[in-house]
Amino acid sequence: APAAPPEPTPAPEPVSAPEPTPAPAAPAAAGGVSVCDACGAENPAGEAYCEDCGAALGGAGSSTPVPTATVPDAPPPVTPVPEAAPAAPTPVAAASSKLKLANGAEEWSLNKDVINIGRRSPVDGIFPEVDLTEADTDSYISRRHGRITMGEQGPIYEDLGSSNGSFLNGTRLQQGVQAVVKDGDRLRLGKTELVYYAN
């Protein structure tokens, strides 16, 4: 008869109650749904992250920093590429070249890609880079007499239809004809003579 009391000991069956806690009833009932531990939203079974808050399903939301990948930081290295462009400033070399009056009275630096030569006319809005107004007191030089363009071969002179012509080393240049000008070449416009110096 005393053996009967030990039977009640199996009463700790309530201990088995924790079993439902490890296995959330919601996911089990849903069958094809996983409940997010972070926000409680339901997500399709098999999803690794919550569609609502992005937290890892079934685990801590510590994986959320994943979306904050620093991948966008990669673009900055591309910026140095454009810096290579300044490596081709060929016109800079031309900055040291110049045209000088044969008598040495005046000179002009050829520091642009296009240099207009002639006499200024404020009324007509003409202001040539090489202004020969003071040197050409008799007005033998046209307001738009000629133009020098910096090319790969060096400066190229072209007569723009001047009244009294352009001469390169004594040879008359026809209007529109382009002639390469070299160091020491003499360019005569009307009665004014210029000498080109490469540097």
Image (cartoon, rainbow, N blue to C red):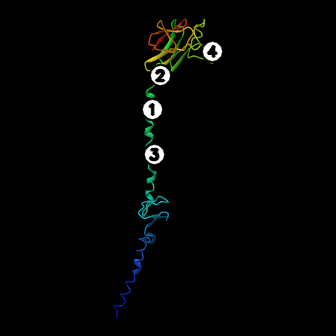
In the image, 38 versus 88, the foreground residue is 88
Please give the residue where the numbered disc 2 appears in the rendered image. 91
Q: Earlier in the sequence, mark 2 or mark 3?
A: 3
Crowding at dot 3, Cα within 10 Å, few <14 / some 14-19 / many 20+, comes out as: few
Name which of mark 4 and mark 1 comes first in the sequence: 1
Residue ID at (57%, 16%): 128
Q: Tell me, yes or no, if residue 36 can be seen here.
A: no
Q: Amino acid at mark 2?
A: Pro
**Percent coordinates x, y for residue 48 in the rendering:** 42, 60
Task: Determine which of the numbered discs, if any, sits on residue 83 in the image.
Answer: 1
- Residue for point 48% across, 19% down: 150
The percent position of residue 94, horizontal first and vertical second, equals 47, 19
Circle 3 sits in a helix, a strand or a loop, which is it?
Answer: helix
Task: Please tell me whether mark 3 or mark 4 is closer to you in this view.
Answer: 4
Query: Which residue is tagged 3?
Result: 72
Q: Are marks 4 and 1 in contact (CB under 8 Å)?
A: no
Which secondary structure lies at badge 1?
Answer: helix
Vertical side of 193 occupied by 15: above or below? below
What is the crowding at mark 2: few (fewer than 14 residues within 10 Å), some, or many (at least 20)?
Answer: some
Q: CA distance from mark 3 to mark 4?
A: 56 Å
- Tell me the number on the disc at residue 104: none
For residue 49, say whether it is visible: yes
Q: Which of the two residues, 63 or 5, is positioned nearer the viewer here?
A: 63
Horizontally, is 128 left or right of 22 in the view?
Answer: right
Nearer to me, 67 or 183: 183
Q: Nearer the viewer, mark 4 or mark 1?
A: 4
Disc 1 marks which amino acid? Glu
Q: CB atoms at circles 1 and 3 under 8 Å apart? A: no
- First-in-chain label (4 vs 2): 2
Q: Which residue is mark 4?
A: 121
